[in-house]
Image (cartoon, rainbow, N blue to C red):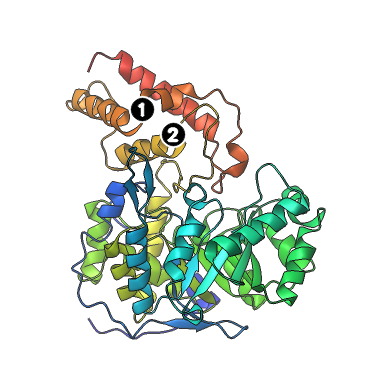
Amino acid sequence: MDKEKKGIGRRSFLKRLGAGAAVAASFSVTGCSNDVQKRYIAEGEGGEVPTDKMEYRTNPSGDKVSLLGYGMMRLPTIADEEGNQVINQQRVNELVDYAIAHGVNYFDTAPVYCKGASEKATGIALSRHPRSSYYIATKLSNSRGNHSLQFGIDMFNNSLSELQVDYVDYLLLHSVGSHEAYYNRFVNNGLLDYLLEQKKNGRIRNLGWSFHGSKEFFDFMLDEAGVAWDFVQIQMNYVDWERGNPTAEYMYNRLTEKKIPVIIMEPLLGGSLATMNYQAMALLKEREPQKSVASWAFRFVGSFDNVLTALSGMTYMEHLQDNIRTYAPLDRLDDEEFKVLSDVAKRKMEFSDIGCTGCQYCMPCPYGLDIPSIFRHYNRCLNEGAMPQNELDSDYREQRRNFLIGLDRTVPRMRQADKCVGCHQCQPHCPQKIKIAREMQRIDKFVQKIREDGLI
């Protein structure tokens, strides 16, 4: 099907969002898990992976950044001699080598990723390449515990050491979300002044922040913080475009008006936009049979000109290859395709699943709960139509049995929802603002009810 490719502006996209009827068939999505990741491009047919067609965006500092950015938050693991899961460095090296060979040059990590091991693994992999061939982004992740100046300085210097570099290309104030946290973590202790001085000294080339907070605080950071930010990282995808406070639409437009480059996190909404049930998949595959469902989400964010790069946590080579195909080169969405994604997003928001992206910021739980895995199992059963609901349904007993067995296999009994005491220590750290204790109580009541319906 021939189609005219066009760039998009704010008014054009707003017009597209308002057009068209909703998708006729209902659909669902699953949470981010290893199974989901392995199915990431199962519906795609692959093909050539270009080495010289990557799309790049140039920011005001002159960096020519690949539109696909490598998120080093979820790295491949392997069991060590004692049976513990550790980062598979050989596999990380292979993935990084492949990414660089195919035009990817932006790598995003943080001190807290992979239980503190991501920066070191990233540094080992990248140090094998010329420093001029990649950009490193890392974060000042001082959100828990010690907010002293010295702690922040030590964290920054440790990042340089772990990454094996003399400077970082992009340094983010990690997950800023409120006035109180911003001032306690960065302003009152003098840490922001220190970081600005490091920028003058060349140890930080671009300074920005990743955002999870309210519209009022977002506006404050842009209008009143008194810092000329070089970039901002926001959560943006075709579901969050018109959902949330603030919406991705609002944040993107404000940053564009300020001429601040945008870096995208969660383009797949925790993996939930990579795999869907057959109705939604058929809708997208009908238009682009050779392309994966995930590619639609990446094409969406890439179609906005002020997006500098879109991050993807690519644990498997298949993830990396599929995303490279999507951006080498980018096939911008046309008017009809924007309408399709708008309809898909509206249907997605009708579901009552829990909006967990599996980021692990809520962990560790002081009482041992595996919060992301509990949510993942619940969402998967709900969205795949496998949730036991009515005892009169002919398949209730089978669904009930499968739910409980699946839960016990996914989450050990001592780490399930009934162990939540409502301490709320996890709540401030959730970027999605999920009422975790409330959801745990709801899931626990549901599980206890179906357990009491009979022995499995």
Q: CA distance from mark 2 to mark 1?
A: 9 Å
Name the residue type under label 1.
Pro
- Quarter of the rendering containing residue 49: bottom left
In the rendered view, tell whether residue 118 sits above or below residue 381. Answer: below
Kind of residue sitting beneath label 2: Asp
Q: Is residue 388 visible?
A: no
Name the N-terminal-most of marks 2 and 1: 2
Splitting the image into 4 quarters, where does residue 39 fall?
bottom left
Q: Is residue 365 above or below residue 160?
A: above
Instruction: Using the rendered image of the protein, determine whether residue 326 is visible from the camera's viewpoint.
Output: yes
From the top left corner, tell me how far across and down residue 36 is, in percent. 29, 50
- State the quadrant of the C terminus: top left
Within-10-Å neighbours for mark 1: few <14, some 14–19, many 20+: few
Residue in view at x 46 percent, y 55 percent: 73
Above or below 81: residue 247:
below
Which residue is painted at 53% across and 64% down in the image?
Answer: 163
Q: Tell me what residue is drawn at x 31 percent, y 17 percent.
A: 451
Picture disc at residue 412: 1
Q: Residue 41, position in %: x, y?
A: 25, 61
The residue at which mark 2 appears reads as: 370
Q: Judge left or right: residue 361 versus residue 186.
A: left
Binning the other alpha carbons within 10 Å of mark 2 as few (below 14), some (14 to 19) or many (20 upward) gives many
Q: Tell me if label 2 and label 1 are in contact, CB under 8 Å.
A: yes
- What SS does tag 2 mark? loop
In the rendering, at what x and y percent does residue 99 appear?
Answer: 36, 72
Horizontal relation, residue 177 to residue 68: left or right: right
Q: Secondary structure at mark 1?
A: loop
Picture residue at 44% right of the left edge, 26% below the top = 417
